[in-house]
């Protein structure tokens, strides 16, 4: 009994020692990570919302504290392609939406991005120290699930109901088996049904042609240019001449990345200018929608680079507002670049799959109407 009590006492002391030392052991076994915050909340994010999603990525060390002086490289991938249920932008599926590298003294990367389609987005992150050996580089992959807009489900339900009504009604009429009159090639009910279907098809084709013509006229008015501005920015001690260049592609294609670069130099000394504040925005011009925005600074070479995709085949405008650390409204520099985005029609396979769904729905509804009418007892 004496030895049993002694063993129990030793066991309790060991458990207490393990418990109190747990806060020291746990951080050693954990790893640095990246925290993803969004505005609005994750469950409220929808594709093509009125305002882009505000993302905040925070690099944290093993203890959950911010990793200062971190270089954050983000690659944002769109949801993978689904062969059976396509989205509104099939060519965007399974592509890179954004590729950006930003040094951060606070260990944060903030940007705004409009998400074009539903599905699971992938955030590939590479975190490296700006100060050598301040922490170990690491990588992390995060995912974000975006639900479809409720209005899409409503429109799909309305289309499905219309197809079922048309198919069932057609099957019911043809299933009546009305006798042919002299000189008729089809019963009157069948002729009325075919005439109605022809009128609906003509209206649908006219709508499609008019919509395509309107889209072509919008594209014809699209234009592009590149701006370069030179101005004098002053602080409290001296006047500094700054020359800014916004470089990049003026023609874009849906589903492909575009490279952009900002360069800042002193035109007198031809030396790069670092730590210039940059406010970058990309807008879709037809509906004046903000699709991407971020704030950053030029690096030690006086540069800032990023790659982004324009998922909507309509004119866009890229603007950059540049200012030094100490600035006022009067000495801000603004650069602009018009981007012509080439729209691509959905793949033929996607259109055929969608058409097959509609034909199958009509066929099932038609067969159901025809079969149920034939099963009716003869009076």
Image (cartoon, helix red, strand yellow):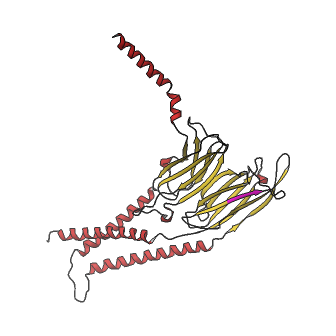
Instruction: Determine if the magenta segment contains residue 263.
Output: yes
Counting from the top left corner in percent of width and height, residue 148 is at 45, 56
Between 15 and 345, the residue placed more toward the observer is 15
Q: Is residue 183 left or right of residue 326?
A: left
Left or right of 63 in this view: 377 = left
In the rendered image, the quadrant that contains the N terminus is top left
Quadrant of image for the C terminus = bottom left
Tell me which residue sits at (59%, 43%) in the image: 58
Residue 42 vertical position relative to residue 82 in the rendered view, above or below? above
Could you tell me how many numbered marks the image carries? Answer: 0
Q: Is residue 296 magenta?
A: no
Q: Can I make out residue 350 in this image?
A: yes
In the displayed structure, 97 sits above or below 366; it is above
What is the magenta range? 261-265
Percent coordinates x, y for residue 161 in the rendering: 35, 64
> In the rendered view, does 37 fall on the left or right side of 319?
left
Q: Residue furthest front?
A: 3
Q: Is residue 137 above or below residue 200?
A: above
Q: Position of residue 120 (x, y in %)?
A: 47, 53
């Amino acid at each position: 009994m004496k030895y049993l009590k002694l063993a129990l006492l030793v066991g309790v002391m060991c458990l207490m020692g393990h418990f109190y030392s747990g806060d020291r052991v746990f951080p050693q076994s954990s790893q640095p990570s990246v925290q993803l915050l969004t505005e609005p909340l994750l469950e409220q994010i929808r594709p093509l919302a009125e305002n882009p999603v505000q993302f905040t990525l925070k690099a944290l060390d093993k203890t959950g504290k911010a990793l200062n002086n971190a270089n954050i490289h983000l690659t944002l991938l769109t949801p993978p392609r689904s062969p059976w249920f396509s989205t509104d932008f099939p060519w965007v599926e399974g592509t890179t939406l954004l590729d950006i590298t930003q040094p951060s003294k606070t260990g944060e990367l903030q940007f705004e991005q409009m998400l074009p389609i539903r599905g699971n987005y992938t955030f590939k992150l590479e975190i490296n120290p700006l100060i050598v050996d301040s922490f170990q580089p690491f990588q992390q992959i995060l995912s974000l699930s975006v639900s479809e807009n409720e209005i899409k489900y409503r429109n799909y339900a309305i289309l499905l109901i219309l197809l079922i009504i048309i198919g069932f009604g057609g099957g019911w009429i043809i299933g009546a088996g009305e006798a042919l009159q002299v000189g008729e090639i089809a019963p009157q009910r069948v002729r009325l049904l075919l005439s109605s279907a022809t009128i609906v098809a003509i209206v649908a084709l006219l709508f499609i042609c008019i919509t395509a013509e309107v889209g072509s006229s919008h594209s014809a008015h699209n234009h592009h240019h590149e701006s370069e501005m030179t101005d004098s920015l002053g602080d409290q001690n001296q006047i500094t001449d700054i020359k800014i260049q916004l470089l990049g592609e003026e023609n874009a294609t849906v589903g492909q990345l575009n490279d952009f670069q900002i360069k800042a130099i002193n035109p007198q000394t031809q030396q790069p200018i670092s730590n210039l504040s940059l406010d970058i925005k990309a807008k879709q011009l037809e509906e004046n929608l903000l699709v991407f925005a971020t704030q950053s600074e030029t690096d030690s070479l006086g540069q800032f680079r990023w790659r982004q995709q324009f998922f909507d085949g309509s004119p866009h405008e890229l603007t950059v507002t540049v200012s030094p650390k100490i600035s006022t409204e009067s000495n801000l520099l603004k650069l602009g670049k018009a981007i012509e985005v080439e729209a691509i029609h959905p793949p033929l396979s996607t259109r055929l799959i969608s058409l097959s769904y509609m034909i199958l729905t009509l066929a099932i509804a038609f067969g159901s109407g025809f079969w149920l009418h034939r099963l009716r007892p003869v009076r």
